[in-house]
Image (tube, grey):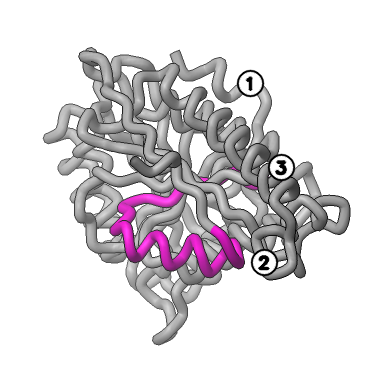
Amino acid sequence: MNRYFQPTRRALLNSYRGYFSILLADDGSPDVLAAVDLLVDLPLYHCTVTALSVVSQREAGSLALREACLDQTRSRLEQAEICAHTILKGGSPAEVILQVAEELSPHLVVMGATGLNHAFGILLGGVAERVVERIRLPILIYRHPYRGLRKIGFFTDGSTQAEWAAKYLGQFPLPDEAEIYVVHVLPPLSIHPILKRRAFQSLWPGGNGKAREISLRDADEILHKATSILQKHGLPTRAVLLYGDPYEQIRDYISRAEIDLAVLGAQGLSKGEEWELGSLPRKLLHYCPCPTLIVKRKPGLLSRIK
């Protein structure tokens, strides 16, 4: 049996009854329509979804269309017995989304990856990119189509941000059939911090057994820490250890394992800071084939999820 295969059985759960607030940036795109499909499938019984549509000056002629999209979204959510509100504003989309997110402080912000006006071949739209770089809240960047939420990839590097992301995911309203694959990647020697190189030399030619044992023990601790957090919330987990370039390994694993949602932690920003998301989260947001949930540290947020 694979030493990194650690299945657990979820105890019989009641439906998720805690309060959970969501801000949905609704531009009427296929990505957002797929995100709504996800929301109506989640076990949300005491939830408020605020659908926000922002019309820029050059899109002023599409006001009626945006109103119709908001009405459609609200109707779909209300049919699923989810409390829904709509907001229609004018202005710069990224700036308005950030402003409303700051005012409402929801548990989750949801956006489509590309929007309606993206150029061919661009996998992450400019509005989504600007928002995700600057926002200090957990944000889900969604890509269509919606295929259910059975396999979730939680990617951990053992950092405090990853630990906080695990705690957030443990309290996230997931369907009962969802299973979490906890993944850690041992990077190549060339990109690993110099103080750790000796411990990782055995993973490549010329290494020694003792260094290999140390590196695997560190990886075991990282995987154990994340799985323990998730299992405390009754979530089924499988731990996976990969070797190589973190981005390439994660991207390939997502496709190979048919992951429905990728989750990882990222450094939160203080006011005035931009473009500090980190190279790995940024690459995944641009090129990951599935929706991506980026969890940024925000003190006090978890205490509001009861």
Task: Determine the secondary structure under disc 2.
Answer: loop
Q: Nearer the viewer, residue 110 or 95?
A: 110
- Are the residues tagged 2 and 3 within 8 Å (C-beta)? no
Looking at the image, is mark 2 or mark 3 earlier in the sequence? Answer: 2
Which residue is at a point 30% across and 37% down the rendered structure image? 179
Q: Could you tell me if residue 136 is visible in this image?
A: no
Q: Nearer the viewer, residue 90 or 293?
A: 293
Looking at the image, is mark 1 or mark 2 earlier in the sequence? Answer: 2
Q: Is residue 167 left or right of residue 290?
A: right
Q: Which residues are magenta?
A: 243-268
Considering every residue shown, the one lying at the far bottom of the view is: 120
Task: Look at mark 1 in the image and give the residue it sits on.
Answer: 300
Alpha carbon separation for disc pair 2 and 3: 14 Å
- Residue type at mark 1? Gly
Task: Look at mark 2 in the image and give the residue it sits on.
Answer: 204
Task: Determine the secondary structure under disc 1.
Answer: loop
Alpha carbon separation for disc pair 1 and 2: 43 Å
